[in-house]
Image (tube, helix red, strand yellow):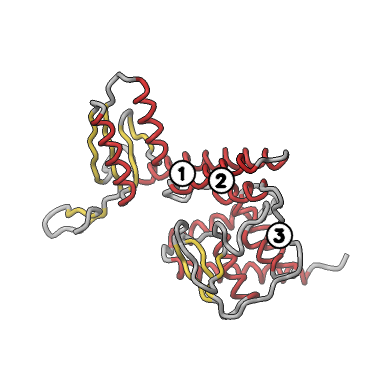
Amino acid sequence: MNDSTVILAQGARVKPLRWLVLIHQIPPKPDYFRVKVRRRLQQIGAVPLKNSVYVLPLRDETREDFEWLVREIRAEGGEATLCRGELLAGTTDEEVESMFQTDRGAHYAAITDEARALAKGDPKDDAIDRLQRRLDETERIDFFNAPGRSAAEAALSAARPGEQPAGGGDAVARPAGATWVTRTGIKVDRISSAWLIRRFIDPAARFKFVPAKGYQPESGELRFDMYQGEFTHEGDRCTFETLLARFGLDDTALHSLAELIHDVDLKDGKFGRTEAAGMAALIDGLVVAYPDDAERLERGAAVFEGMYGYISSRAQARPPE
């Protein structure tokens, strides 16, 4: 049995454990150590349940982070206990997840605001690099897919000197039967982009889902909606918009669909699409119902095929002006 399961009673079901809980007490002196511990808790992404009680999702890397902190606290004369378990009453798993999402979402929002401010001036490389490090650090501890990540990535991309927005230059050649790679946990931009790739760009495309960090692409693979990917956010555009521009897809219905996907993904209301809230709810439903990325893509592709058909039919039925 691994560390993430517990037998509730003899012969009863095995229930996964979800959380690591740190209970600590710091000596009043020296003053700097209290500040050091608080900063360290922020760096590893822990959130407070109560005063001096912090929680992280149960994973190998988070356990190691907490164990190192326990050693530091004890070395300075403090007390620290690390537990693993489940929440039974008082606070639900969903409430704790929301705490993580709220905290990471606030980080993404701050990065987005700073990146947009940099884009209005003459940003220096070191300022952008510092902001990129903050984004990388936030993504590392974004355990529950907080909102705002895509907006932060797009804003930072737009702030880089010499960054070219999607839509410039000649259309690139369309691959045939390529392996297209993207991050696991696909949502609106990745689902719709995969549908677009197979429907209009590379009908024989194969898809591969990999961790967001540390993946080294194999020869011939094409990455989309990934940091440093071949097709990803450019300027203030989502990946779906980038694909449209880079492959020269001029279909009016596709561009209308791109506006909807942009508003759902980046949440900036740029196009004011009234369908955005409904589309966001539908995608959230797919995420809950289909945890497997391949199945989620299959179901999601049907959604975008239907939406594309609906937009196309409306455009054809519209009387000429």
Which type of secondary structure does the marked residue at label 2 adopt? helix
State the residue at coordinates (38%, 42%). Answer: 96
**Label 3 or label 1, whichever comes before in sequence order:** 1
Q: Quadrant of residue 22?
A: top left
2 or 1: mark nearer the eye: 2
User: The disc labelled 3 sits on which kind of residue?
Assistant: Ala
**Label 2 or label 1, whichever comes before in sequence order:** 1
Q: Nearer the viewer, residue 65 or 299?
A: 65
Q: Classify residue 53 as left or right of residue 6.
A: right
Disc 1 designates what residue? 101
State the residue at coordinates (73%, 70%). Answer: 171
| CA neighbours of label 2 inside 10 A, class few (<14), some (14 to 19), many (20+) | some
Q: Nearer the viewer, residue 159 or 251?
A: 159
Which type of secondary structure does the marked residue at label 3 adopt? loop
How far separated are the C-alphas under marks 3 and 1? Answer: 30 Å
User: The disc labelled 1 sits on which kind of residue?
Assistant: Gln
- The percent coordinates of residue 276 (x first, y second) are 62, 54
Instruction: Tell me whether the residue at label 3 lies in contact with that at label 1, contact meaning CB atoms closer than 8 angstroms.
Output: no
**Label 3 or label 2, whichever comes before in sequence order:** 2
State the residue at coordinates (41%, 62%). Answer: 291
Q: With respect to residue 290, does 109 lie above or below? A: above
Q: Nearer the viewer, residue 269 or 61?
A: 61
Q: With respect to residue 244, does 274 lie above or below? A: above
Disc 2 designates what residue? 132
Disc 3 designates what residue? 166
3 or 1: mark nearer the eye: 3
